[in-house]
């Protein structure tokens, strides 16, 4: 007599929490962040000062706000190169609202709403019409900033009401700026959205294999549309912060930010081809970029040298694991 | 002649129609002299669009072309300042441009990094190198020799040399793309990489050569640009890479690779060039240019996508008749 | 007569599957040899061995009596063996002439491609096969039949002695098929040895001189077409293999669950109507390209039918997306597992819970413990073999990936499950597990549609079988009429045997 074999038990996880954490990309980023921090504190006596460190956060908070949404978009296999142009258009809309005599709440709402509308336009073109996002957003990148140029030409909006300054220059408590709080808040929200909700799961599924996701009952077009909407929303919020911090709007505002945001996302371990990446990775990448920029600033190294470093870092961090695997 | 396929013909008609409309109100725009100027002015865009088009054919993208142009242009200006003879400068810029392109190509081919990441990185690095070489200083007109500045502006048969260079490159690459094994391999690699392998074509190597060509053309353009505008600095042609990609997209080069012609790239560049030069003539603020080209890109993408929608399988006998 | 190509004792195994076991094949000059067998008989494997894509584990290949080896696709081409595959993939953006000559184009001055010579050569090759195609036309503008002709011309641009035609007529219209037959005659007259792979008996009898039959990766027999009839061939082809045992089922068929009427699509299928009951397994048989998967994908909301209605449990439902199909209780296990099945890159448990995210979450927030317990539950029921549930599903074998896909759908508690070629390309062990599980599900009252091209599977598992041909239902078979002969004849469009 043979007894039927009991059902095979499959363990939930292959490795424990610690092993997984240590093997992760984030672990490398933490190490890099600590190294940069220590290097900075040795290189400059001004670095370890609470107010200086607080200033350093302004280098990355606004870009990081967009990077959170961009990370989800890239994980889903799309990209939005129009984010900096959305900032320009949203900031211009804020200027128009101010000129029309609106108060601070309306100005802020105008900026955010403009961002959402721009995101909806991108979303419609990509998710609705099925066009490739990289070229669509190269197009809307010209279009959105182009509208800002039509409105402003070589002029600028200045003289925003003093109440607006809080969003880009205000402090919540001691050295903790409003932008830093917003950054932390959005980090938590996007972490939860990507890693803890059904929506986030759909994003990963679409990024790994959009066809199979559709064949699993996922509403692929709807998810893509929402992702563009979110990226537009975050660009609108970033526009409010940046406009507030600068106190003026020029059509050339935030030029080149799209590439910095994408760099931040990729440095954070998000696969540019979609399918993988985490919000903590993006947070760490933002902090590293901020610390490096600030450290170079303290050493009087010009910004462009810093960009060489970031360019090399971008290629290096992606090349290294690929070259190691080949061995 | 089946040289011009439908979308190229359509684009050519759009360009001719807009020139015609402008001509009814502003006849001065269509004088041969002015048209030659418009073409000459568009030449750098045409030159870079040729290279970009080849890269896009192979399913890649090169965002470093403008930075490459700025770097080689600066090297040309510095060599000129050091008294190096012009022919040697020309040779150097092309070779240097090709090397910068080869760096991109090797990272794509041998390391397997997506081209958008590679060239995003190298575009900042190449511009940064200019700063390291010059400490951010400009090389101005008075620091350049007359011969250095004169070459691209020298007029032959009503068209400056820069324009003739663009024409020559179009002709050369029209032959390369249609008449050489490498040229056809660009199309095969982008159109169907799996089948290309079966036809004995190395996908990575072909992409590498696309980047080398794109780089060499950017190097050549670097000299022409710096000499013509008689100034070299870190931010020369800042953001120009996106105009170049836009020209290709408007010209019907499929971003997914494998489809498009050099005539498309030429027409896409001319379209942007005509708009840029016509706006001030017709009295529209030049600030409209950006929005117009953005709209053109979106329309072009939508048009191309509508044309190439995949057809389903035909199973029913009556449907196959 | 001496064969041009002679294969002896060829074996080829893949992990878990013995694709070919000690098979032989002879091809003679100026003759067409038909290779006959069901799906999974090893036909495509032998084609890949012949074209240098697979290396056999054992056996010899002889050309003109001399031993040969094909370590690469190039080597096979050099030896004069060339194949035209089922899915002809060439280059849409290149011209016809360029597609023919890519990689070995004639050169002229300065090493440039000699376009005139290329065009002339292409025209000569196309004329040689009687194809009226402009060598300068863009390939993407051609219809499927002309693309086939170009593929054939490309194959002939190499001095080929052996030409393999792998289901060349599967996607062609009637008129195009006639043209292809003429081409085969031309090639025969040129003395080429032709291997012709087809499921369609009418064409095999029309053009083949000899036949070779494979079954389950083994050689069954060969001979001259003149000495055999349809019945004998069908017998050799389907002769029930002893090692496949199907589960004994309690047939307990209940009320109608799904009623489809008049489903039509402009190009893919027309007038599809059937009723599916609780506890029933309904088989869909037909040749590859008969439109079965297309019908199923329309039911699942991937495409939208132009006409027709679909009733589920008595209610008319309009299904415009897969999400709506899942809501309505219809789920689909696709044939193309790599592209449409499991989401590779995601771990097993996330694949299983993907369509049931609502059930393992509260207010949109996922509950990890619920996810694992759901995944554990269903993967164990299917006897999944995996190291851990957080393992990437892409690391599993084909059979285990299929189990994950089935588990994913069962977790949604569907009313109707459609299985499209559920055991294609998976090992025997997993096959039996899938079959046993299907029987268990039917016993529990689930309504099952099984699309399959394997006759033993269709007959062994189904309560009823619908046969499709060219996008239409041509027969419905149940009870005593459920025999291999009936199915093969209906699918191939042959008259019913007296």
Image (cartoon, grey):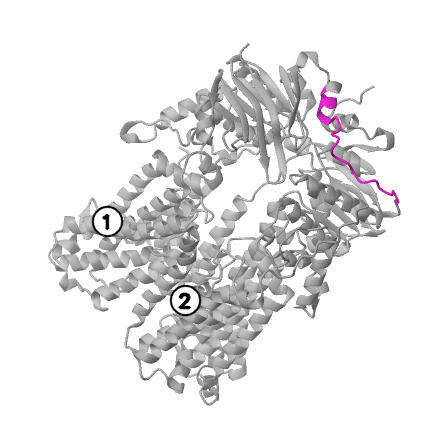
The spot of residue C469 in percent (x, y) is 72, 31
Q: Seen in the image, is A81 located left or right of residue C418?
A: left
Chain on which label 2 sits: A
Span colored in magenta: C233-253
**Vertical side of B126 occupied by C424: above or below:** above
Helix, strand or loop under label 1:
helix
Graded by Cα atoms within 10 Å as few (under 14), some (14 to 19) or many (20 or more), the crowding at tag 2 reads many
Q: Name the residue under label 1.
A: B95
When asked about the image quadrant of residue C252, the answer is top right
Name the quadrant containing residue A248: bottom left
Residue under numbered circle 2: A260
Q: Nearer the viewer, residue C211 or A212?
A: C211
Residue drawn where x is 47% and y is 63% of the image: A269
Seen at 63% across and 43% down, the residue is: C336
* Residue C299 or residue A197, whichever sits in front: A197
Q: Quadrant of the C terminus of chain C?
A: top right
Q: How far apart are marks 1 and 2 (CA)?
A: 30 Å
Q: Which chain carries label 1?
A: B
Please report the residue visible at 43 percent of the width from the left and 70 percent of the height from the top.
A31
**Residue furthest toward the top?**
C1
Quadrant where the N terminus of chain C is found in the figure: top right
User: Is C22 displayed left or right of B248 in the figure?
Assistant: right
The answer to whether residue B19 is seen in the rendering is no
By secondary structure, the bulk of the magenta-drawn segment is best described as: loop
Q: In this view, does C145 lie above or below C423?
A: above
Q: Is residue C188 magenta?
A: no
* Residue C241: in magenta span: yes
Q: Which mark is residue A114?
A: none
Residue C120 coordinates in the image, percent (x, y)? 40, 22
Comparing A44 with B59, the one in front is A44
User: In the rendering, at what x and y percent does residue C236 appear?
Assistant: 72, 22
In the rendered structure, the answer to whether residue A297 lies left or right of residue A318 reads: left
């Amino acid at each position: 007599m043979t007894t039927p074999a009991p059902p095979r038990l499959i363990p939930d996880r292959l490795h424990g929490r610690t092993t997984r954490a240590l093997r992760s990309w984030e672990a490398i980023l933490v190490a890099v962040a600590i190294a940069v921090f220590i290097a900075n504190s040795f290189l400059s006596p001004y670095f370890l000062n609470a107010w200086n460190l607080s200033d350093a956060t302004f280098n990355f908070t606004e870009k990081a706000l967009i990077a959170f949404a961009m990370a989800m978009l890239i994980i889903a296999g799309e990209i939005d190169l129009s984010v900096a142009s959305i900032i320009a258009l949203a900031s211009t809309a804020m200027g128009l609202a101010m000129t029309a005599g609106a108060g601070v709440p309306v100005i802020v709402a105008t900026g955010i709403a403009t961002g959402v509308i721009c995101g909806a336009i991108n979303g419609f073109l990509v998710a609705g019409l099925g066009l490739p996002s990289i070229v669509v957003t190269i197009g809307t990148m010209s279009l959105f900033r182009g509208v800002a140029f039509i409105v402003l030409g070589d002029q600028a909006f200045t003289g925003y009401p003093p109440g607006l300054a809080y969003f880009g220059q205000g402090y919540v408590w001691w050295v903790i700026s409003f932008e830093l709080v917003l950054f932390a808040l959005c980090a938590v929200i996007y972490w939860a959205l990507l890693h803890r909700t059904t929506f986030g799961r759909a994003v990963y599924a679409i990024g790994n294999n959009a066809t199979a996701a559709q064949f699993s009952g996922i509403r692929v077009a709807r998810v893509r549309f929402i992702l563009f909407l979110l990226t537009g929303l975050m660009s609108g919020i970033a526009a409010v912060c940046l406009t507030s911090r600068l106190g003026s709007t020029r059509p050339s505002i935030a030029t080149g930010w799209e590439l910095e945001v994408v760099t931040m996302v990729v440095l954070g371990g998000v696969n540019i081809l979609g399918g993988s990446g985490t919000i903590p990775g993006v947070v760490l990448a933002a902090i590293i970029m901020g610390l490096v920029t600030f450290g170079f600033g303290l050493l009087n190294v010009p910004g462009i040298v810093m960009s060489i470093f970031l360019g090399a870092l971008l290629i290096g961090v992606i090349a290294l694991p690929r070259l190691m695997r080949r061995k | 002649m089946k040289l011009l396929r439908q979308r190229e013909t359509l684009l050519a008609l759009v360009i001719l129609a807009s020139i015609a409309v402008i001509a009814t109100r502003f006849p001065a725009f269509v004088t041969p002299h002015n048209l030659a100027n418009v073409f000459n002015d568009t030449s750098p865009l045409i030159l870079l669009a040729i290279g970009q088009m080849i890269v896009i054919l192979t399913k890649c993208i090169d965002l470093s072309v403008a930075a490459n142009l700025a770097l080689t242009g600066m090297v040309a200006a510095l060599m000129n300042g050091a008294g190096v003879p012009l022919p040697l400068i020309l040779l150097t810029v092309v070779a240097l441009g090709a090397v910068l392109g080869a760096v991109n190509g090797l990272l794509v081919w041998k390391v397997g990094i997506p081209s958008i990441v590679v060239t995003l990185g190298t575009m900042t690095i190449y511009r940064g190198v200019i700063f390291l070489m010059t400490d951010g200083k400009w090389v101005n007109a008075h620091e350049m020799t007359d011969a250095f500045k004169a070459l691209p502006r020298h007029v032959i048969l009503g068209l400056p040399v820069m324009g003739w260079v663009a024409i020559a490159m179009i002709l050369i690459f029209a032959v390369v793309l249609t008449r050489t094994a490498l040229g056809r391999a660009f199309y095969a690699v982008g159109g169907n990489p799996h089948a290309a392998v079966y036809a004995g074509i190395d996908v990575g190597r072909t992409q590498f050569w696309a980047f080398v060509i794109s780089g060499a053309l950017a190097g050549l353009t670097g000299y022409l640009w710096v000499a013509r505008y008689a100034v070299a600095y870190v931010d020369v042609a800042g953001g120009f890479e996106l105009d170049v990609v836009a020209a290709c997209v408007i010209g019907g080069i499929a971003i997914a690779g494998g489809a498009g012609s050099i005539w498309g790239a030429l027409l896409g560049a001319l379209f942007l060039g005509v708009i840029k030069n016509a706006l001030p003539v017709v009295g529209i603020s030049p600030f409209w240019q950006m929005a117009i080209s953005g709209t053109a890109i979106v329309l072009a993408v939508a048009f191309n996508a509508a044309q190439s929608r995949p057809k389903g399988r035909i199973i029913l006998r009556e449907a196959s008749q | 007569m001496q064969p041009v190509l002679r294969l002896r004792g060829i074996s080829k195994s893949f992990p878990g599957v013995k694709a070919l076991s000690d098979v032989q094949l002879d091809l003679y000059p100026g003759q067409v040899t038909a290779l006959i067998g069901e799906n999974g008989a090893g036909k495509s494997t032998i084609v890949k061995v012949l074209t240098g894509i697979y290396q056999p584990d054992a056996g010899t290949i002889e050309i003109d009596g001399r031993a040969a080896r094909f370590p690469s696709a190039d080597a096979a081409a050099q030896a004069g063996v060339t194949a035209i595959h089922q899915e002809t993939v060439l280059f849409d953006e290149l011209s016809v002439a360029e597609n023919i000559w890519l990689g070995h184009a004639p050169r002229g001055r300065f090493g440039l491609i000699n376009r005139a010579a290329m065009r002339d050569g292409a025209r000569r090759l196309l004329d040689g096969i009687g194809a009226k195609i402009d060598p300068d036309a863009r390939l993407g503008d051609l219809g499927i039949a002309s693309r086939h002709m170009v593929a054939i011309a490309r194959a002939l641009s190499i001095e080929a002695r052996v030409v393999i035609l792998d289901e060349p007529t599967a996607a062609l219209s009637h008129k195009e098929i006639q043209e292809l037959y003429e081409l085969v005659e031309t090639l025969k007259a040129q003395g080429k040895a032709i291997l012709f792979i087809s499921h369609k008996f009418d064409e095999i009898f029309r053009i083949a001189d000899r036949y070779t039959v494979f079954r389950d990766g083994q050689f069954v027999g060969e001979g001259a077409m003149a000495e055999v009839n349809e019945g004998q061939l069908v017998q050799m082809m389907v002769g029930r293999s002893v090692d496949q045992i199907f589960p004994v089922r309690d047939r307990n068929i209940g009320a109608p669950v799904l009623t489809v009427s008049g489903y039509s699509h402009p190009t893919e299928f027309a007038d599809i109507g059937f009723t599916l009951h609780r506890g029933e397994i309904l088989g869909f048989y037909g040749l590859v390209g008969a439109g079965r998967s297309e019908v199923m994908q329309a039911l699942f909301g991937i495409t939208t039918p132009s006409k027709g209605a679909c009733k589920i449990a008595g209610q008319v439902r309009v299904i415009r997306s897969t999400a709506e199909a899942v809501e309505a209780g219809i789920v689909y296990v696709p044939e193309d597992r790599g592209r449409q099945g499991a989401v590779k890159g995601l771990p097993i448990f996330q694949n299983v819970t993907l369509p049931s995210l609502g059930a393992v979450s509260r207010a949109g927030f996922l509950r990890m413990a619920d996810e694992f317990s759901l995944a554990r539950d269903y993967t164990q029921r299917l006897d999944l073999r995996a190291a851990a549930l957080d393992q990437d599903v892409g690391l599993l074998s084909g059979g285990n990936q299929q189990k994950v896909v089935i588990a994913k759908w069962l977790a949604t508690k569907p009313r109707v499950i459609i299985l499209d070629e559920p055991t294609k390309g998976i090992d025997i062990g997993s096959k039996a597990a899938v079959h046993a599980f299907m029987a268990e599900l039917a016993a529990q009252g689930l309504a099952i549609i099984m699309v399959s091209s394997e006759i033993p599977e269709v007959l062994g598992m189904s309560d009823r079988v619908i046969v499709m041909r060219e996008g239409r239902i041509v027969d419905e078979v149940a009870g005593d009429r459920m025999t291999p002969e009936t199915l093969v004849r209906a699918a191939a469009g042959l008259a019913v045997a007296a």
